[in-house]
Image (cartoon, rainbow, N blue to C red):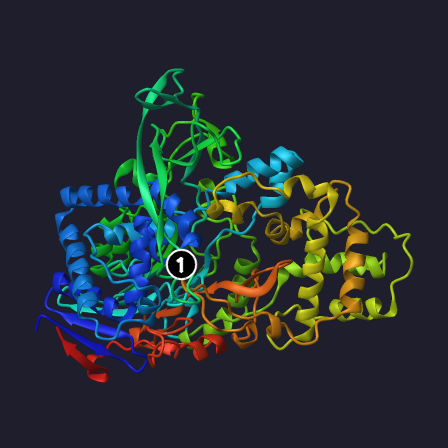
Amino acid sequence: MSAETYRDAWGIPHLRADSPHELARAQGRVTARDRAWQLEVERHRAQGTSAAFLGPEALSWDRLARRARLADTARRCFTALERKDPETAAWVRAYVDGVNEGLAQNRRPAPEFARTGLTPGQWEPWTPLGVWLATHILFAGFPAKLWREHVSTHLGPEAVALFAADGPGTAGSNGWLVSGERTTTGHALIAGDPHRFIEDPGVYQQIHLSCPEFDVVGLAVPGVPGVAHFGHTGTVAWAITNAMADYQDLYRERLRRTGAGVEALGPDGAWHRAARHTETIQVAGVAGVAGVAGGTGERETVEVEVIETDRGPVIAGGPEGLDDGTPAALSLRYPPRVTSDLGFGALLPLLRARRVADVDRALDAWTEPVNVVQAADTEGGLLHRVAGRVPVRPAANGLRPVPAWEPGHEWTGWHTPPRAGLTDGVAVMANQRGPSTPLGVEFAPPHRADRIAALLAGRERWSAADMPAIHTDTHLASATPLLNHLATLTDPASPTDETVSPTHPAPPTTPTTLTPLTPQATALSARLLAWNRRMDADSADAAAYAALRAAVVRRLAAHPALAPASLPPAYPEVLQPWLALVPRVAYALEHLLRADDLYGIDRAATIRAALEEVAAAPPPGAWGDTHRLAPWRVLPDATRPADAPRLSGDHDCVLCTSAVPGLTDRAARGPAARYVWDLADRENSRWVVPHGASGVPGSPHHRDQQPLWLRGELAPVITDFTRLTKESDD
């Protein structure tokens, strides 16, 4: 055989080949068959050419991709990979050959191709690296530095901690490792769920890769060979969470035009020539197929000036400043651009790993993104470490854009990735402060991590079958500050919740001078204070709490004291979500309600008004009636909000289904997969994705896993080829 493709009952591809090279080719081929539309979208995003078929809405991303030099960086990294690691480079080439073969042979193209008039294009050897880079360029959240500068400028330096300390990142995960001493089998368990934007098709692809050198099941990123983040080889398994590390810098540049081009002022006080050229982006017009953003009508062209200084590519502004005339230019410095290394040298060693030590050595080559890794093997080996490349530089670089013309902001080396151990036989990571603390600025609140640790502590022995109960826990610890305010509003002498700590004091209990609450508001307050704090889809109390929280967020964001921060600077549209005030108030609500003073805002009056507002028009149903799945799709579909699946959970629940309080209850982000890796017997492992194995609408495996995902159930991991259905010989 050269390669064989099998499927299980869920349509998940199981591939078998004679060599890693042929296996990579088969992986590329089957991915093109199952995810052709998704692959083409990702290829165009990496190249900055998506507006050519998606229209003006994609232009801002394309500008960023061009100006940040994503495709050029991917080419550089692949060229370096060919030089330093020719085996891995050839393996990536084989995957690309398979993608091109699969795209050419696809007999059932996704309907999106007809809707847009798009024809699959040619993948280049560097394209998988470009897909990986485009997927993660915003992962570390460098735009948060723009927010810190913005809020500090308008509300004062103290606002940075008030709004952002332990604030949410754009992506995260839950992950926990239970050692053999705490399991029913005596062998370790690894479980968790990566939290990302829920896309349709999904961002993870369940796959089984088998050849004489290795046999691995895991979650692949469509467009990238191998299994990078979550895998089980039979004798060793690994999984990651976002380390929340800060490894990208923004520099304010002083640029000037000369007869020869553009110059940038350096930290030595001299002007230095910057690289400069122009590129053209094609943008689809509005004529064409109805309902498609760009249609298939006429295209216009937009010129983009690409400038790169000694710090990095200029991603916003230029010699003439921002679009509104503000004199500003920002360059982005990120490790792969500096080192020409994206960490792909770790991918083959991970597949070949047999023990924790093999995973550990492989991860020494990891670059981007920076992750916390948990691993275990069948011999009792355990691993809990950070993997990735974080530059050594002054602390100021991590907070906000720094002046490129001042000395002292240079990168001077790389941090040694920290390591950690287990506590009482378990290790829990949920993007909170942990082993990666020295490498980051903002981390997730500790609620998810604390809740997982508490649940694990509640039982002496755990099995793989027990893990979904943790995946789906809906307790909302972050409700405490608002409910404490509510308690003092209705009874100023009432005791505070026992979870309030000295570092997070309860709100002041000064009696209010306002008139008594209406009977409806009093009843609502009593109901919420008796609520079990679980964000269950069928809970009317959870819906009422969410409505109150949203009303408080809206009222705080509209207060004149915060008005100066409501108008963001004229940075590119793709960066604006990090600068919007309402989401910032929503995610910082705990801190805003616990602060000693909030710019003179009468929080008691604000919460009182919000309570009366909700009491006068309470939500008519349960939390799941408005908290519904809103997956991101490249092209819009006809799904109405009321037709979308109902969801339990909330941002700070272990079941992290994130809405944006004050804007919408719909959840665009949540568990992009769930997994349980059992080191006692790999076939006791379980997994699930939000939709299905196929990205083709109408396929029986397009959304067949969604009922499992919604119920918190998992599908079995099958590795025995005699239990699978053979699809083809390739």
Location of residue 379 in the rendering, given as x and y in whole percent from the top left corner: 28, 64
Apparent side of residue 234 relative to residue 625 in the rendered image (left or right): left
Question: Which quarter of the rendering shows the N terminus?
Answer: bottom left
Task: Tally the marks.
Answer: 1
Q: Is 446 drawn above or below residue 400 in the view shown? A: below
Q: Can the viewer see residue 38? A: yes
Q: Nearer the viewer, residue 610 or 38?
A: 38
Location of residue 327 in the rendering, given as x and y in whole percent from the top left corner: 51, 28
Q: Can the viewer see residue 495? A: no
Q: Residues within 10 Å of mark 1 (few under 14, many from 20)?
A: many
Location of residue 293 in the rendering, given as x and y in whole percent from the top left corner: 43, 60
Residue type at the position of mark 1: Gly
Q: Nearer the viewer, residue 120 or 15?
A: 120
Point out the residue furthest to the left here: 1
Using the rendered view, name the quadrant where residue 439 is placed. top left
Q: Nearer the viewer, residue 416 or 533?
A: 533
Mark 1, secondary structure of its residue: loop
Using the rendered view, name the quadrant where residue 5 is placed. bottom left
Question: Which quarter of the rendering shows the C terminus?
Answer: bottom left
Q: Which residue is rendered at x = 83% and y = 70% of the image? A: 520
Q: Which residue is mark 1?
A: 294
